[in-house]
Image (cartoon, rainbow, N blue to C red):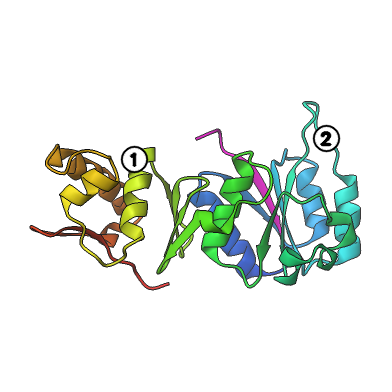
Amino acid sequence: MASPAQLLVVSPDSTLLRVVQRCAESLGHEPIAARSVAQARRTLARVRIDLLCLDSLLPSDDVECFCESLTTTADGRSPHVIFFGPPAAKLVSAALPPFLRGKIAGFVAKPIDAIDVTRELARVLSGRSGRARRDDLLRVGGVALDGVTHQLLFAGGGAISLTPMEYKLARYLMEQPGEYIATAALLQHVWNYPPDSAPELVRAHVSNLRKKLRKAGEEALVHTMPYHGYAFVPNAP
């Protein structure tokens, strides 16, 4: 992963501040909270910010003046902006404040969901442009697999990054939640290997995936049943 990004989250809503901070920290970034535009100005005067998160609850006139005051740094960069607003603003650009139309790098609809927040933070900070397709996000229970960033996102705000093969394995299991998939079937459909080859390959990748899940407190998501195989057993959303 690239070096940690510095985030400034501006909102009078303590719940939104808490969720965004937790999601940013789970991705390895450094969030700073501000409850008002005035406080955000003071922070920006002393800290270089990579990403600015703005809440629709903030006074529109104050936010407009604040955004107009943002200048590029010596290396020609200015902070990306993620806006937290009503669902209509995602579908109809006219629902966005005029000064933000065409200028925001990301959008999260309210009431916010930790998975959506984590995914949008990861997408914007990865340097991707444009909106990721919604079919790149596979949701099963309280877990989502992001096809853009190859991360597992948890409703509690955590996230883990997967290798390309771990991603393929997790996706195949998640597409059939609760069903036990035999090792031979995984070798065929995930690795494109003959069904009677290298069962230790599957065991090794399942073990690595479980180690990452264990660190996130989510080890129980992947179950093993002798002679039946492996299953992704979703938790509650």
Q: Which numbered tag is attached to residue 105?
A: none
In the image, is residue 27 part of the stretch drawn in magenta? no
User: Could you classify mark 1 by the number of other residues whose Cα lies within 10 Å: few (under 14), some (14-19), or many (20 or more)?
Assistant: few
- In percent of width and height, residue 190 lies at 29, 45
Q: Which numbered tag is attached to residue 72?
A: 2
Q: Residue at x 76, y 40 (%)?
A: 46
Q: Is residue 176 above or below residue 166?
A: below
Residue range highlighted in magenta:
1-11
Q: Nearer the viewer, mark 2 or mark 1?
A: 1
In the image, is residue 2 part of the stretch drawn in magenta? yes
The quarter of the image holding the C terminus is bottom left
- In percent of width and height, residue 103 lies at 81, 49
Q: Secondary structure at mark 1?
A: helix
> Which residue bears the numbered disc 1?
165
**CA distance separating discs 2 and 1:** 39 Å
Q: Is residue 38 above or below residue 3?
A: below
Going by the image, does 93 lie left or right of 51? right
Q: Amino acid at mark 1?
A: Met
Going by the image, does 116 lie left or right of 188? right
Between 147 and 37, the one nearer to me in the picture: 147
- In percent of width and height, residue 114 lies at 53, 63
Considering only order in the chain, which callout, 1 or 2, is on the residue closer to the N terminus?
Answer: 2
Between 216 and 33, the one nearer to me in the picture: 216
